[in-house]
Amino acid sequence: MKQTLLIPSILALALFSSCEKEETPAVKNYWPEAGVTYEIFVQSFYDSNGDSIGDFNGVTQKLDYVKELGANAIWFMPIMPSPTYHKYDVTDYKAVHPDYGTMDDFKKLLEEAHKRDIKIVIDMIINHTGSDHPWFIEAKSGRDNPYRDYYVWAQKDTIADFLNKKTITLDSDNIRQWHDPGQGEDYYYGFFWGGMPDLNFDNPKVREEIYEIGRFWLEDIGVDGFRLDAAKHIFPDDRPLDNHTFWKEFREKMVAIKPDVYLVGEVYDKKEIVAPYLPGLPALFNFDFHYTLLETMNTENGMLLANKQKEVLDFYQAITPSFIDATFSSNHDQPRILNELGSDPAKYKQAIAILLTMPGAPYLYYGEEIGMLGLKPDEHIREPFLWDKKSKDTGRAQWIKPKYSKDSTVVPLELQRADPSSYFNHYKTLIQLRNSYPALALGNLMLPETELPKTVMAYHRNTGGQEIFVVHNVGKAPVEIEVPEGFEEVIFSLGETALSSGKLKLSGNSSQVFLKK
């Protein structure tokens, strides 16, 4: 019997959301192994008191929104006191920035988040402190100061060849890494910037200070875990084994305090460098995924990402059988993904469909779900969230004049809520889909053995007897493929597709997800 099924994206959304209640799969929370984490820059999120800066109480007011989106956890960019807007140069590890509110405000946020089954992960910056931190102020006062050895020092004549370093790394464009404090011949080491002097982890006292800071946030305050900034740079790049050993020790100390602590590390590099950190940092950001996703979409090379992800997962498996692959499409350090995709809505929606149907524990950067825009410098990747039309948006942060995410370029959330084809509803539908089918959340990744058209990405997700087949045409021209036998039930569709007698026609940037009966 010949069957033809034509599903444009808006109709697919309606079909998915209007299933009979008893037939709709239960939505589960798969965090941390495969749940969704929402990254928030507090300063730009929601201003509750009218001072132009986002704050903890503003986040608390918007927790129901995070829940509505379907996220299981929030990662906060730095919240500790600092002299800069980004707050990666900490001056007090056991306090919160007064612009964001009080510690009581933060504790209230935690309490309300936990009531909604939303976990809270905070940025922990331990590679360096700020140059205004009391430790460093003491350290630079003289060679005999007890805090001197908390940092890394060298005499000017011994490092002359390194003073004008020209190598630019993936995670730093700073060409000077030894800095003059203006008090003699000794220079201090600051990998990222002179305002961020690196701590000396060869000093046991430094390590004990860091473990105590971790204890404070886990035990006294009650956060669920840490995102560990610059995890690759605890020791210099030529001491990777010391880095690996430190993170194993750090994990042991944190687990002793909180057995279910969540630790996700930023090791900004390729898989061969990233994977050995897994025994110490059970979750690691997958930068290969981010860059290959963009390359896939912009070169229309269908299997490029699927092959790369399979390669990464197999490589990680060889290091440890238990790991969390923290995938992401963009974050606070990368240009907004919609910009990277040429502001093409079809490519953007498909990129997110790929992210949320692939293995991993995906991270979403605030504002992605409404199509926010942003390019370097970093301030303009971190512009304020658009909740409503400007005339109505009393909670919109105004600490910076937006250059990219404005009412003229981005449709505010409230208007997107009412539009079934909006970015917001696209994200919401895909997150619900992912959390409704165990194979999409937890399933392994299997690639087809048959040859496919160059622009087609296809993969199987399998777990516990449930099997799902996902196919994307990342090109602009239509293609046709054979659907594997047994896959007849469509549970998600994007773009115009037509299924007839086992053959699937896919228009440009269209996707389809099948459940095997």
Image (cartoon, rainbow, N blue to C red):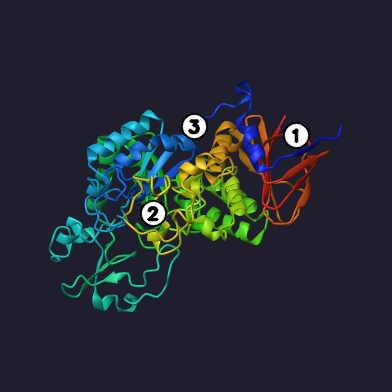
The foreground one among 37 and 99 is 99
Q: Residue furthest front?
A: 391
- Looking at the picture, which amino acid does disc 3 mark? Asn
Between marks 3 and 1 in the image, the one whose residue lies nearer the viewer: 1
Q: Which mark is residue 192?
A: none
Residue 189 vertical position relative to residue 41 in the rendered view, above or below? below
Q: Secondary structure at mark 1?
A: strand
- Looking at the picture, which amino acid does disc 1 mark? Glu
**Disc 2 to disc 1, C-alpha distance:** 45 Å
Say which residue label 3 marks.
29
**Disc 2 to disc 3, C-alpha distance:** 28 Å
Q: Quadrant of the C terminus?
A: top right
Tell me if 280 is positioned left or right of 447 in this view: left
Q: Quadrant of the N terminus?
A: top right
Say which residue label 2 marks.
231
Q: Secondary structure at mark 3?
A: loop
Between marks 2 and 3 in the image, the one whose residue lies nearer the viewer: 3
Say which residue label 1 marks.
488
Reading the chain from its start, which is encountered first: label 3 or label 1?
3
Count residues near mark 1 (Cα–Cα under 10 Å), then give few for <14, some for 14-19, many for 20+.
Answer: some
Q: Secondary structure at mark 2?
A: helix
Between marks 2 and 1 in the image, the one whose residue lies nearer the viewer: 1
The foreground one among 202 and 141 is 141
The foreground one among 256 and 466 is 466
Tell me if 421 is positioned left or right of 104 in this view: right
Q: Residue at x 42, y 70 (%)?
A: 168
Determine if residue 279 is in view: yes
